[in-house]
Image: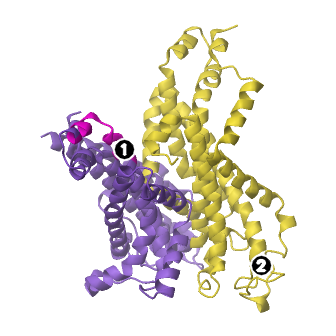
Chain colours: A purple, B yellow
Amino acid sequence: MAVAGVLLKRSVSVVPVLAVVALIAFLLLRFSSGDPVAQLAGDNADPAAIAAIRARLGLDQPLPVQFLHWLWRLLQGDLGTSIVSNQPVSTQIVQRVGPTLAVSLTTIIFSVLVGVPIGVLAAWRRGGWLDRFAMWTSVTGFAVPTFAIGYFWIYLLSMQLGLFPVQGYASLSEGIGRFLWHLTLPTLTLSLVYVALIARVTRTSLLEVLNEDFVRTARAKGLPERIVVFKHALRNAAVPIVSIIGIGVALLIGGVVVTESVFNLPGLGRLTVDSVLARDYPVIQGIIMVFGGAYVAINLLVDISYSFFDPRISAQ
Amino acid sequence: MTATTVIAPASSSVGARTFVRKLLRNRTILFGLGVLALLALVAIFASVMWTVDPSALKPRLRLRPPSAVNWLGTDNLGRDIWSRLIYGSRVSLIVGAVVAVIAVIAGSALGLIAGMVRWIDNILMRMMDGMMAIPAILLAIALIGGLGANLVTICVAIAIPEIPRVARMVRSVVLTVREEAYVEAAVSMGTRLPVLVIRHIVPNILAPLIVQATYIASSAILIEASLSFLGIGMPDEFPSWGNMMADARLYFQIRPGLMLFPGICIALTVLGINRLGDGLRDMLDPRLARSVGGVK
């Protein structure tokens, strides 16, 4: 009951945010320089043909009416038609979502698996070499552009050592080995900042918890340090760690766009850049909706997971 | 004499001097200031420091190693790397500063309005939530797609996604300060709104605003580099560090320096500004330092 209530309340609160994302995507097309209709009609179209297209797309109507139309079509899952390929935008997005999803998931999994233990060790041996190393890596890691990290890995691991392919993507249907082999460098590239972020928050959050009375009690009754840290402390330090994973998603999506370009992955990031270069506005709008929706959905999940880690939160 | 003048902190030249001394004793801040000062000097005196015209094409001198004429070698079109690096500092510095100023001014205005006027607050904050749901770099890419790419549109496109973050912070400070007894006292004495804002709100948001401005500047420099790298940032005739790395994509196997030098410039600049921000944050507001997990 409590969980269902929280779920419902949070889900409803997401609706206005998505509506604003739709409004921004809508306004972007209307206020962009250059007439997309003229582009759609081609170079040799006469004014009558342009007016006809304008009427067909509903662009001759007042802005609020146009926005409601756009919302109505969105609700039916219709994201419009690409100017360049004439395909439905939703079809194009579905075709390109695979690599983006794959590299995002491997990055999140890898970052949690590496970042949390580093953070725990750094907090446990506070001021030790790992602590200092982790902190300095994160400080410098935040300063290096994602694409530069990508080329560093390409140079070191593929060109010099020949361990991984320089670029390209293999879908899961080509076998899990090939799939992961192609995803290794993009994942390493995207993970650096994310690992640093998670390690830092884990460390801070754990240090706070380790000062609590119940940790002292657990130690006093003679529990091994391993159990004190992992069973008592880490679970209570989980909420900030989970929330940084949610906040980091925006960072991750931004990084994906650049990383796909570096490694030539045929995902949504490449599609974004190609669409901007081709001024294919309907596709850009569709991508904004998809990424905005993903961000909102993931943060909704993160919010809901709080009640799992800290039952007190759902009671409120 | 009004009550507000009594409560306002005394600002004297003595206070300012101890503040400066405190700044200069902090190694983190000193490092950040040093990097920024160096960058500013390079950007201002670029025309003296470059040895070869940064845009001059010398197809016969392509991809040359460092020499007496071309200190760091040449790129794939025979352009001098050292001179382009020097010139590129201008783009990064301008983008960082302009974006921070736009985002801070627009964000503070919106945050103030949201914090003061109840009925606007709800609408404005829902708009800000929606904007924050779109990743900054994606929104910037989309805006540039609409506006076209030049120095002005790039700055605007990078600044717009940062505005909600500033607005949120300013709003939360305004909401807290509003409840303070000294503000209530000032209001009940009939202090006018502009005076109220300048005397009580501004001193409270100044410190977090300065810290946030440094982070906005460094992230703007990174986003500009990424946009240029993707080919939708600064037009190719402007040497920017991002553009140089984009050009290096096909040639860095032969000359890793093509990628390495601009990369180091970006990283050092961003690192410097970030350290300045970290240092100021720890000094101005120790509470913030803990919640973000500050690096000592």
Drawn side of residue B80 relative to residue B48, left or right: left
x%, y% of residue A263? Answer: 47, 79
Q: Could you say which is closer to the camera, residue A61 or residue A98?
A: A98
Amino acid type at image mark 2: Asp
Gap between marks 1 and 2 measured at Cα: 50 Å
Q: Chain of mark 1?
A: A
x%, y% of residue B105? Answer: 63, 40
Q: Is residue A76 placed above or below A265 in the rendered structure?
A: above
Tell whether label 2 touches label 1 (CB within 8 Å).
no
Whether residue A211 is visible: yes
Snapshot quadrant of residue B251: bottom right
Label annotation for residue B80 = 2
Q: Is residue A264 placed above or below B4 in the rendered structure?
A: below
Drawn side of residue A159 relative to residue B42, left or right: left
Q: Residue at x 64, y 43 (%)?
A: B26
Q: Residue at x 28, y 87 (%)?
A: A174
Q: Residues within 10 Å of mark 1 (few under 14, many from 20)?
A: many
Q: Is residue A94 magenta?
A: no
Label annotation for residue A207 = 1
Q: Could you say which is closer to the camera, residue B216 or residue B227?
A: B216
Element type at marker 2?
loop
In the picture, which quadrant includes the N terminus of chain A? Answer: top left
Element type at marker 1?
helix
Snapshot quadrant of residue B4: top right
Snapshot quadrant of residue A93: bottom left
Drawn side of residue A259 relative to residue B57, left or right: left
Magenta residues, start to end: A204-219
Q: Residue at x 67, y 69 (%)?
A: B241
Q: Is residue A316 placed above or below A234 in the rendered structure?
A: above
Judged by its main secondary structure, the magenta piece is: helix
